[in-house]
Amino acid sequence: MKKTALTVKKTFSDVIFLKKVIQVALPIAMQGLLNSIVNLVDNLMIGNLGETSIAAVGLANKVFFVFSLLVFGVCSGSGVLSAQFWGKGDLKNMRRTLGMALTIVVSCSLLFVIPSITNPHIVMRIFTESETTIAEGGRYLKIAALTYPLIAISNAYAATLRAANRVKAPMYVSLVTIMINVCLNYTLIFGHFGFEAMGVAGAATATLTARTFEAVALVTIVYVTKSPAACRLSELFGFDFKFTRLFMVTAVPVIANEFMWGLGTTIYSLVYGRMGDGAVAAVTIATTITDLLIVFFQGTSNACAVILGNELGADNLERAESYAKKFVVLQLLASVVIAIFMVLVSPYFIGLFAISKQVMTDVRLCIIMFALFMPIKMYNYVNIVGILRSGGDTKYCLFLDCFGVWAIGIPLAFIGGLWLQLPIWVVFALVMFEEFFKMILGIRRYKKKIWLRNLTF
């Protein structure tokens, strides 16, 4: 207990550390908060169209969810290398890393775009058997899928900027993007200012327009300001064997990690979809609200990866280890505070949705279950995304996430949701139980210090 108190005291007395966290984490968290706010506004607007529309858009966005995790995996893996190359002062290989990331994410985006445009109803049928939900979701997905290549480009550049501690530009671009999205949602979903009411198709069109602006604006800022990511094509794609091998060894497990984890969580949606539109709506709304309140942890975890990566690349191993402990303290303390806050304020958010009393009750109970597991889940987040990945221990991260989802979460979802036919909030809690096992294994790996290494050459 005394040792823990001393660690907490050291964390909050280290001004240099706290300043770095604020400079890197705050803009990332703000960007995440803005994205969560627009998701909330989207769902509020779509919620006025009924529970079927909420369920349709929620399930259609599961395709984007899997794709976004793939993009996140590529950008996280490339971000690990970029942060270490930046810490070493190796701009040449940092730009090569950006080029490799762009090549992979844009190519992969096409694998999601083509089936979503050509056969949206078949894609929707993976998640639900409701014909009305399939029809609504197909209308949304066919347009929304066009945003995937744009999102891929934006994320690749944003990851490189974060690795170089240039985090404000992506945040400002996101702010304007979200304002465009919200305004167009209001205009196109309901048919204001002389436009025809398009329903869910209007929401997709608004997203496409906003994401187009985001990609163009971010790349323009990169080159106008001559940031570290501004480079010639030859600098982006001049790969050699040594670099390619390092990228693959470091990034491929992260890519596989996010994709397999995303695929697994999408199977959760398959279970929810067969429990009815009410269950899907409850989980969609609960997730929207929880996402709004956990952006701080996403910011600190990504900041952890950047800051530790910079220190490891500069061979400051002792400082990196010290910072890792302090990030864990911050994450755990904040998770307890925000979990309590989440439970207290969630009824006010739930009341904004046009849903039945039963769905409201289910949303409330899902949020309480999330809050109970929150400290464990947020520790896993900073440990896996921030600490272990910063030093390239990505294969074990792959094992942790895949073990949690595929060996524990998915079996419990099928048993609880389809076999025992338990209420949605109970199934939601069963799915969260995977975090407990990931925490135990993650702590053991963290203490072995395998992650504490310089990856650069």
Image: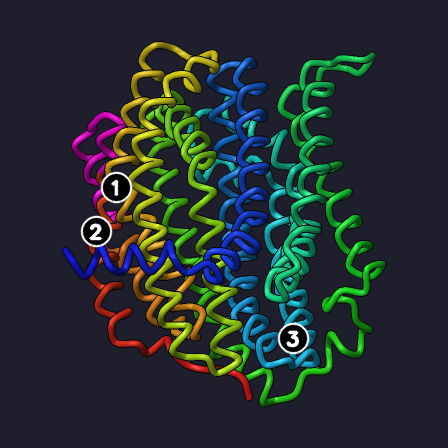
Q: Earlier in the sequence, mark 1 or mark 3?
A: 3
Residue 260 lies, with reference to residue 350, above or below; the image says below
Label 3 Cα crowd, 10 Å radius (few <14 / some 14-19 / many 20+): many
Identified by mark 1, the residue type is Phe
Q: Residue at x 28, y 28 (%)?
A: 424
Residue 55 x, y percent position in the rendering:
47, 26
Residue 340 x, y percent position in the rendering:
30, 31
- Mark drawn on residue 456: none
Identified by mark 2, the residue type is Phe
Left or right, 203 with reference to 320? right
Q: Earlier in the sequence, mark 1 or mark 2?
A: 1
Mark 3 lies on residue: 94
Write down the region rendered in magenta. 408-429
Q: Residue at x 29, y 55 (%)?
A: 8
Left or right, 297 with reference to 121? left
Q: Dominant secondary structure of the magenta stretch? A: helix
- Tell me the CA gap for discs 3 and 2: 36 Å
- Mark drawn on residue 373: 1
36 or 111: which is nearer to us?
36
At numbered mark 1, what does the secondary structure look like: helix, strand or loop? helix
Mark 2 lies on residue: 436
